[in-house]
Amino acid sequence: MIDKIDEHISYIKNFSSRDIDSIESLKIQFLGRKGIINDLFSKFKNVPSDQKKEFGQKINELKNLAQNKYDKLKSNTSKSTKSISEDLTKPGFPISKGTLHPITLIKNQIIDIFSKVGFELSEGPEIEDDWHNFTALNLPKHHPARDMQDTFFIQQDPDILLRTHTSSVQVRYLESNSPPLKILSPGRVYRNEAISSRSHCIFHQVEGIYVDENVSFADLKQMILYFTKSMFGKSRLRFRPSFFPFTEPSAEVDIYWGLETETDYRITKGTGWLEIMGCGMVDPKVLENCNIDSEKYTGYAFGLGIERIAMLIYQIPDIRLFFENDIRFLKQFKQ
């Protein structure tokens, strides 16, 4: 019986083929459920005791040899088949390019406009303390923004929170740098607001500040005029008196958008005017909180929401679209 196993071993060693059917037949013949190897294992109990060790070793040798031979021939056949089936003259598959998010596109455009007139970028942490987010910016203890329903607090006493504006970045920069300075602070901010088509608890702001000697409101108006011309191609502005704790005087800036289309009527509520940003002269108390001489230096500040600008330029009706990551929406901004 051992001689018969040696014959099988010799047969497998000499076996060679590139035909898939022949290779599969070899596997069935030796490794199948009713194959030669299983048949030999079933006869193991009839082998004399003094031959069982050698018989078992021969069967295992045969089994390993058959499995290795099958794997090797199958592998070679697969490679050969693959190389024949591939047409190297065919054009390659197109690479699908992604696109920048519309928020990023508008942010980069705003940064580019202000960087041309000397503004430098400054960034800060999204998790802020009470001093940089409220106190240094002249927000009193009773201000509504300090309430739990308007701000996401992480802890209290001491207060740690998600920043409600990027003005906190300006405070940090003013504390560690001396005038003259001209900085732009883009970033993500958080407010505890109900999510709707017009508002969201997460949004993006760009705030700018310029501090130097003899800075006036006229300088601020000229800068905003330059921005609106560059961004929208429009120069008809309206400044409405307003209130912000960190600027005095303060103003809301409206741009005349026009009433050429039905969409213009809807977004301007039939007036043609559209609010785009808030601005004002930096309050002397804010400068003093940052160890800057308010008698010598003055400055202006402004801030605008990136989502609002993007919705205007791209005519997007719902702010929630910016946060849904819907590929059908995002691929429309491919450049």
Image (cartoon, grey):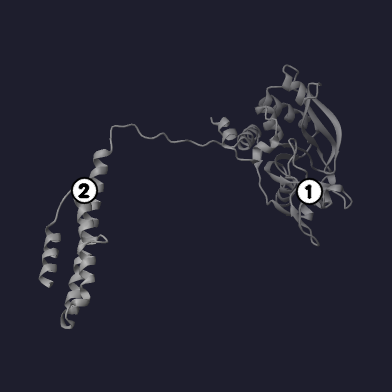
Picture residue at 16% right of the left edge, 81% below the top:
48
Taking the image as drawn, is residue 235 in sight?
no
For the N terminus, give its image quadrant: bottom left
Question: Along the line of sight, which residue is nearer the eye, 272 or 192?
Answer: 192
**C-alpha distance separating marks 1 and 2:** 88 Å
How packed mark 2 is, by other alpha carbons closer than 10 Å (few <14, some 14-19, many 20 or more), is few
SS category of the residue bearing label 2:
helix
- The tag earlier along the polypeptide, 1 or 2, is 2
Question: Toward which corner of the image does residue 59 lie, by quadrant?
Answer: bottom left
Residue, far bottom: 50
- The amino acid at mark 1 is Ile
Q: Which residue is mark 2?
A: 21
Q: Is 334 on the left-hand or right-hand side of 80?
A: right
Picture residue at 10% right of the left edge, 70% below the top:
3
- The amino acid at mark 2 is Asp
Give the vertical position of 28 relative to 329 (above or below): below
Question: Toward which corner of the image does residue 239 lie, by quadrant?
Answer: top right
Question: Along the line of sight, which residue is nearer the eye, 274 or 73?
Answer: 73
Question: Along the line of sight, which residue is nearer the eye, 316 or 41?
Answer: 41
Q: Which residue is mark 1?
A: 292
Residue, far right: 142
Picture residue at 75% right of the left edge, 28% below the top:
222
Q: Marks 1 and 2: which is nearer the front?
A: 2
Question: Toward which corner of the image does residue 36 lie, by quadrant?
Answer: bottom left
Picture residue at 22% right of the left edge, 77% below the top:
45
Q: Is 81 on the left-hand or right-hand side of 241?
A: left
Return the x and y of residue 203 as percentages of the image width and height: 70, 42
Return the x and y of residue 117 as percentages of the image width and height: 66, 33
Question: Along the line of sight, which residue is nearer the eye, 135 or 35?
Answer: 35
